[in-house]
Amino acid sequence: MRPSRHLRSAARQRSHRLPAAAAGDASEGRLDAEVIRRNKAITAHMRAGRVADAERLFAAMPRRSTSTYNAMLAGYAANGRLPLAVSLFRAIPRPDTFSYNTLLHALAVSSSLADARGLFDEMPVKDSVTYNVMISSHANHGLVSLARHYFELAPEKDAVSWNGMLAAYVRNGRIEEARGLFNSRTEWDAISWNALMAGYVQCGKMSEARELFDTMPARDVVSWNTMVSGYARRGNMVEARRLFDAAPVRDVFTWTAVVSGYAQNGMLEEARRVFDAMPERNPVSWNAMMAAYVQRRMMDEAKELFDMMPCRNVASWNTMLTGYAQAGMLVEARAVFDTMPKRDAVSWAAMLAAYSQGGCSEQTLWLFVEMGRCGEWVNRSAFACVLSTCADIAALECGMQLHGRLIRAGYGVGCFVGNALLAMYFKCGNMEDAQNAFEEMEEKDVVSWNTMIAGYARHGFGKEALQIFDTMRTTSTKPDDITLVGVLAACSHSGLVEKGISYFYSMHHDFGVTAKPEHYTCMIDLLGRAGRLAEAHDLMKDMPFEPDSTMWGALLGASRIHRNPELGRSAAEKIFELEPENAGMYVLLSNIYASSGKWRDVGKMRVMMEERGVKKVPGFSWIEVQNKVHTFSVGDCVHPEKEKIYAFLEELDMRMKKAGYVSATDMVLHDVEEEEKEHMLKYHSEKLAVAYGILNIPPGRPIRVIKNLRRLGRKLSVISRSGTSIPTPHAAPFLLAASCRSRHWTSTLLTANGPPLELLSSGGKVLGSRGRTL
DNA sequence: GTAGGGTTAG
């Protein structure tokens, strides 16, 4: 239910009868001890969360005062029952300013500020509490100038008004303005001093905070706590401890601040000693100690505390959940998630991040669906997790739906979610949408720019990548080392050799970026692709660190392109030394041998792989059809529609042979029998996926096939509207698919200008099961 | 008797 509409009409209806109510009613105005006693009881029930008890008491009261209603109203609001609060408000016979203020506060914190503003405008009588609610609730939403507006509007400002305005500045990081307000008058109380002090602590200005602390007229326990926790958070445990020992009074806050200070600064034993000495503990203290163990991955100790603690709250469960997740114990994390009595946004975000970072793409998506079913608000963190999962498995349709949802949620312009969105579009090969999303982002950070540059570079759009880089240089965002990796990769992929070399040697001077191994890898790749193998090799010898397997891999790839088997072999040997289990390298070297017909060497590689227990990752291809992901492997016989698919392929094969097509069996890089080779060409996973796409996707719509393997030394195979030619044995089925979608089965067999058809060799992850709805 | 401002954990 939307409260605003009902509310406005309710307020309007009663505005004309309010003067009578304000004048009071003789029977109600009289002191009634019994009513007051029951009002107190209602408040007590509500504060303890016993809404039903309060309701029972309320219903049984023979006489009520406006305070009775107000107590119920405040109780409903505090227990998250906003719709009930609104309807109760409408039933109050003679609402007073108290009633209005209570509802105003409830709207401001749990509904929308617009609703609160509407009620504010209609309030017949306003007092300083009314203004104070408006000041602090706008401040809490970051709307400092509106907070200031209500502050100035207030005819009478009490201590809370001044402190509210002070807190408005402090909480939004505007410490200078807070100081200005503070200096403008002298009548400040302890809360004001503490607020300003906390402001300095928050922005790390401990000496200014200390000066306030030393000069303040009166210190209460909060003042000490603010300073102790401030020092603790900045890692100054010596000073934190000194103040802790000097404090005249210590409460749970003081103790907990010291415990979490030691914990966060890696002083586990000290943390535990203080924790054990605590005279009184609350859930926060327990959580702080648990977090200390969690940080050190000491999950058994954390669990022991968790089981011991008498009063667990959501944060306690969340601490265990994130602990298991960060330790890679996803099963335990999920068990916590499933058993916790109550979940909040942190719980969902932690579980999503656990799956997403653990590479469990399917579980991430399922959990996200569950999140929607539970009515949980999808926050920025959840969007970012799920988008990065969509990127992992190149699930474009799913990602685009998320894009729509996040725009509606108002997250489209920020860089936290925006960067994940860009990465998703690039991973799915959708440069246009990435560019559009990038242009719509209101805040761009260095990651946004880097994502764009690397994204374009990775798909071979070097010029576009460099254009983005040039635009970036006109902004205030400074390029970092990752930016330069993208720039060098862009030069490499678009053959801008001299430009790349020039960036490499000037980047330290121009951008203060020192060459890291990643930059050298780009340069080896760049020189190697250009056929300057000797220079690439020399650069490897001259660089200030040992070459790693990625660098040798770049050299190996280049050796293959420029047909230098000797260099290729020595590069491969280095890689086998460094990474004896890197299956990709065996396959790559094996392919070098195969392409020159050295089947015996290919055989040796296979024996080597078996001896060393190297497992080749099986190749999968998949396709999204109506929000379902269909996965295929070579010669697949699991898919429910396999008969249809194979029959269709047989038919295609017949027509191709009639048109004079001969299978390019020599390109199948396995030493297998001729017939077997043909079978592999006919039924390799990409082809099955394309066939399924042709059968199930309406003509005119793109068929996007994604595969998990991305072979080194070969560029992406993308057949696009522009008809890029494809130098792989897989060309034929795709050209064929393109042609049969354009209903010219044979005549367009060797041209690729049919409807859009894309093959993404994206290195995506294979989903665990098939044909599942996302 | 009922509403508004400062300190701790994830």
Image (spheres, coloured by chain):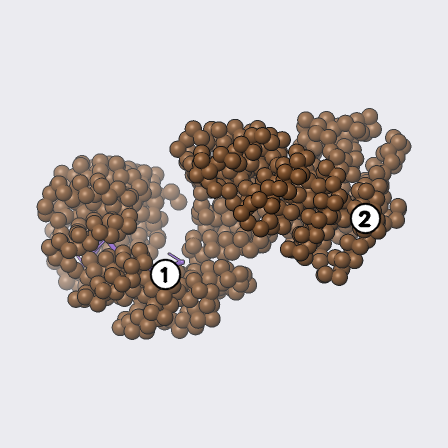
Q: Name the secondary structure under disc 2.
A: loop
Image point (55%, 49%), residue name: A545
Using the rendered view, name the quadrant where residue A244 is placed. Answer: bottom left
Please state the chain letter of the residue tagged with numbered disc 1 in the rendered image. Answer: A
Residue A341 at least partly seen: no
Chain B is shown in which shade?
purple
Sequence-wise, the earlier of marks 2 and 1 is: 1
Placement of the N terminus of chain A among the 4 image quadrants? top left
Image point (65%, 50%), residue name: A766
Q: Seen in the image, is A688 located left or right of residue A177?
A: right
Q: Which residue is denoted by mark 2 in the rendering?
A: A670
Chain A is shown in which shade?
brown
Q: Same subunit under labels 2 and 1?
A: yes
**How many numbered dots are placed on residues in this image?**
2
- Look at label 1 and name its amino acid: Gln
Circle 1: is it few (<14), some (14-19), or many (20+) Cα within 10 Å? many
Asked whether A711 or A429 is in front, the reply is: A711
Please state the chain letter of the residue tagged with numbered disc 2 in the rendered image. Answer: A
Q: Which residue is denoted by mark 1 in the rendering?
A: A264
Contact? badges 2 and 1 (CB < 8 Å): no
Task: Report x, y in % for residue A61.
Answer: 24, 60
Circle 2: is it few (<14), some (14-19), or many (20+) Cα within 10 Å? some
